Image (cartoon, rainbow, N blue to C red):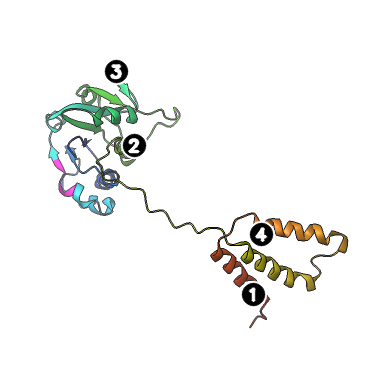
Amino acid sequence: MSNAPVIVLVRPQLGENIGKAARAMLNFGLTRMRLVAPRDGWPNPSAGPAAAGADIVLAQAEVYETLAEAVADCAHVYATTVRKRGVTKPVLTPEEAAKETASAVGGTAFVFGPERSGLETDDVALARKIITVPINPEFGSLNLAQAVILCAYEWSKHAPDAGLAQPPAEEILPPAPQEELEGLIAQITEHLEPRDYFKPQGRAHATRLTLRNMLTKPAWNHLEVRTMRGIITALMRTPR
């Protein structure tokens, strides 16, 4: 996809977090990762297991010494940060940034800082715009993969060629015909009557009506009715 953004991780500290970020990327169709001065070098053996199958992202990851080199070919650079870090730049939500990138001409980079401290002021200064989200002022800490997935998900909503799909819906069976419900009601009633469930006699009609309303309200399908009848049959057997 020509307009798919590059995910740039600046000075990432743990291989596990790089792997989790790769997993978040691939979930939403992003495969281009760039690493800036990873603390433990690259490749990192801890990244693969954490990626949970997103190996294509790790295999294609590019390593740079500086952020400037990592985004040199990008015309649109977004720094993700909770704080502005004293730099005056336009501030967008992930959704607003995603809308821009959908029609942007030229490469796009979403830049993420180290896990512990986030992007430094000099890093943010390289960006054209800032991405941030409204967050709990008492706890404004997102881990790296969470931050990546926010941006990747919003991008995917505005990328018609991302090739994403909803999980297939399970087949919903139609409600059972009334005849099957009547059979269930009759079976339950048959087992309740000899156990004096419908006594006193003055309350029998109301109790039967309540039972009928309960059993007809859920719009059970025929498999559910059959299952319930099987349960009742099993309950009435003499234990072994």
Residue kind at label 4, given as amino acid type: Leu
From where the camera sits, is residue 44 visible? no
Q: Residues within 10 Å of mark 1 (few under 14, many from 20)?
A: few
Which of discs 2 and 3 lies nearer the camera? The answer is: 2
Marks 4 and 3: CB-CB under 8 Å? no
Q: Nearer the viewer, mark 2 or mark 1?
A: 1
User: What is the span of residues highlighted in magenta in the rendered image?
Assistant: 58-62
* Three-letter residue code for mark 2: Leu
Q: Is residue 133 visible?
A: yes
Membership of 60 in magenta stretch: yes
Q: Which mark is residue 215?
A: 4
Q: Position of residue 237 (x, y in %)?
A: 66, 79
Disc 4 versus disc 2: nearer the observer = 4
Q: Which element is circle 1 on?
A: helix
Q: Which mark is residue 150?
A: 2
Q: CA distance from mark 4 to mark 3?
A: 64 Å
Mark toward the viewer: 1 or 4: 4
For label 1, the residue is 233
Q: Earlier in the sequence, mark 2 or mark 1?
A: 2
Disc 1 and disc 4 in contact, CB within 8 angstroms: no
Q: Earlier in the sequence, mark 4 or mark 3?
A: 3
Q: CA distance from mark 4 to mark 2?
A: 44 Å
Q: Nearer the viewer, residue 176 or 5?
A: 176
Is 34 on the left or on the right of 150, as rendered?
left
Q: Which residue in the structure is indicated by mark 3?
A: 86
In primary-sequence order, the first of circles 3 and 1 is 3
Q: Please give left or right for residue 31 compared with residue 229 in the image.
A: left
